[in-house]
Image (cartoon, rainbow, N blue to C red):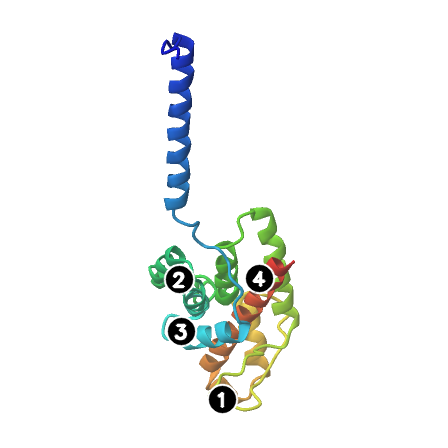
Amino acid sequence: MNTKISRRTALAGGFGLAMAGFMADVAAAAEAAPEKCWKYVKLDPAKVAQAAYDAFGANGCMYGAVKGAISVFAETTTCPNDKAAAQSFPFFAFRYGRGGCAKLKEICGAINGAVLFMSCFVEDFAEIPALAKKLADWAAETELPTFVPADDKYPDFLKVKAGGITCAVMGKAWMSAATDEQKKIVGERCKRHTASIMGKAVEILNEFYAG
């Protein structure tokens, strides 16, 4: 039996062992690596809408839209990293969307929050304008609010088509059609409006990922 090993053979053997060790390390690292955060899972639009309605509170439309949707996502996802990320989300920051961006009466805070929610999951920015437009077109041309809460204290709630997506246009359209009694519950209109927008946004996202 020849016990002599050439330098080339030794080097080749050493290289092979080194590569084997490297590949084992890569495999181990890949197995241990955390899953990518913000992986979308199909959500129930009705459940999200109700959650947005419930979350509205004193912080308004954008806050309610984002908190409601992400809270339902956190309950639905099975990824621990996504649960942790969602639970630590800075919802409080989204008070600014109230009143059409800090009361500037510009873009509707619910639409703003809905597009933000979409952007958490859609990586390619080129896709986001199309999704936002689909939501905005629906919001402008639909008689809102479409949402009816589980505990409906106001049956036959007034619905109005605004023809635009700013807080000023949408709010004015509803107020112009409302009776004096209905104007007293304009806050309820804002809550239902937010829920309607967020429910539709989730419906659009579900369709996007299904396709």
Query: What amino acid is at disc 1?
Result: Asp
Query: What amino acid is at disc 3?
Result: Ala
User: Which of the two residues, 173 or 15, is positioned nearer the viewer here?
Assistant: 15
Q: State the mark number for residue 205.
A: 4
Q: Quickly name the residue at label 1.
A: 152
Mark 3 or mark 2: name the one nearer the start of the chain: 3
Mark 2 or mark 1: name the one nearer the start of the chain: 2
Name the quadrant containing residue 38. bottom left
- Tell me whether circle 3 and circle 2 mark residues in contact (CB < 8 Å): no
Mark 4 or mark 1: name the one nearer the start of the chain: 1
Quick one: SS at disc 2? Answer: helix
Relative horizontal placement of residue 211, taking residue 72 as reference (left or right): right
Mark 4 or mark 2: name the one nearer the start of the chain: 2
- Label count reads 4
Q: For the point 63% across and 75% down, which residue is it? A: 161
User: Which of the two residues, 35 or 85, is positioned nearer the viewer here?
Assistant: 35
Label 1: how many Cα within 10 Å (few below 14, some 14–19, many 20+)? few
Label 2: how many Cα within 10 Å (few below 14, some 14–19, many 20+)? many
Q: Looking at the image, is mark 4 or mark 1 nearer the viewer?
A: 4
- Tell me whether circle 2 and circle 1 mark residues in contact (CB < 8 Å): no
Distance (Cα) linking label 1 and label 3: 16 Å
Distance (Cα) linking label 3 and label 2: 12 Å
Label 4: how many Cα within 10 Å (few below 14, some 14–19, many 20+)? many
Q: Quickly name the residue at label 2.
A: 94
